[in-house]
Amino acid sequence: MTVWRLENERFQVEISETGGEISHIRDKRESREWMWQPRADVWNNSATQLFPVVGRLIHEGVWSEGQFLPLPAHGFLRRQPFHRINNNSDQLVLEARSTPETWAVWPWKWRVQVHITLHDEGLTFSQHIFNDDTRPFRYSVGWHPGFALPVAPETGWWVDFGEEGVNGPFPTRERTLEIKNATPLTTQFPLTSEAFQDGAVYFGVSQQRQIHIRRPDGVTVLTMETGAHDWLALWGVPGEDLLCIEPLAGTTDAPDFDGQIQHKRGFQQLMPGNKQTFDVRLRFAMDA
């Protein structure tokens, strides 16, 4: 499997051909690895891309115009090969596109381009979704990076959503998400040992937000700036030094979802010949 590498004065980054997955963000100045390293008994990925669905499908697929489309949880993009379009020392452009195999389960012509750019404090990760078909299609997209942070042994870590806040928290049950009518505003979320006992926790209205991960002493260790993503999910495994921060356009299924694609919560619609872009910027603190 091909692995591409980017490097600047501070960071060394590796990206895998399969799924266009960032597998390493090594901080040379801090002598640390920021990405979670896969473990089969915990989580066997580092930073998966999600397309054309996000989360669990309770019917193991969706219906579109009377046709059932069998799809795995989180879609098929994380298993697709990516090809290099452009590359220099601190920037990489990759692309995956529809194939006869994907047409069998998602009968539209699509492309996903990923732009990864290093900067002094971290990197920018951009997903560009193209509709190369003659018909519009509906889809969800997201990024599922996991970070190696000592949230298990050190109590008191928390997520700071800033003064604007987000809606939530909305916990999942058996990987389904029920949204009540009330949408409370949240500016902070404590990363307790019980936070993810039932699974991921979702937050809404998360577009254009700065999300700060803070140590018990209040120092910011990691900042994520979201783009057009209207949802954010947090997830971890109790007892493990893993925190996933997932900017999403779409969610896992509602427990009463009828399976019809037009009723899928958070699905975007993309017209023929158009594209949509979802940017994420990561900043990693020094001396943290």
Image (cartoon, rainbow, N blue to C red):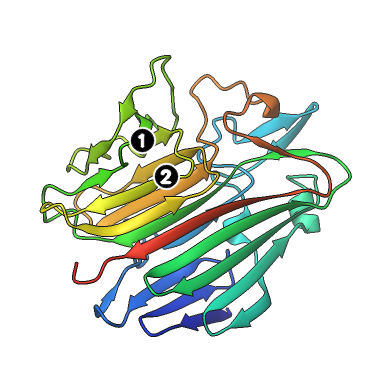
**Residue in the picture at 61% in, 21% down:** 258
Whichever of callouts 2 and 1 sits on the residue coming sooner in the sequence is 1
Give the image location of residue 106, x and y in percent.
74, 45
227 or 75: nearer the viewer: 227
- The residue most toward the right is 134
**Residue in the picture at 50% in, 35% down:** 252
Quadrant location of the C terminus in the rendered image: bottom left
Q: SS class of the residue under badge 2? A: loop
Give the image location of residue 17, x and y in percent.
59, 72
Q: Which residue is denoted by mark 2 in the rendering?
A: 209
Q: Amino acid at mark 1?
A: Glu
- The residue most toward the top is 181
* Figure check: 150 above or below 37: above
Residue 164, quarter of the rendered image? top left
Q: Amino acid at mark 2?
A: Arg
Are circles 2 and 1 on residues that touch, CB within 8 Å? yes
* Figure check: 46 above or below 255: below
Q: Which residue is denoted by mark 1 in the rendering?
A: 164
* Figure check: 94 above or below 171: below
**Residue in the picture at 50% in, 25% down:** 254
Q: SS class of the residue under badge 1? A: loop
- Count up the numbered dots: 2
Give the image location of residue 117, x and y in percent.
52, 71
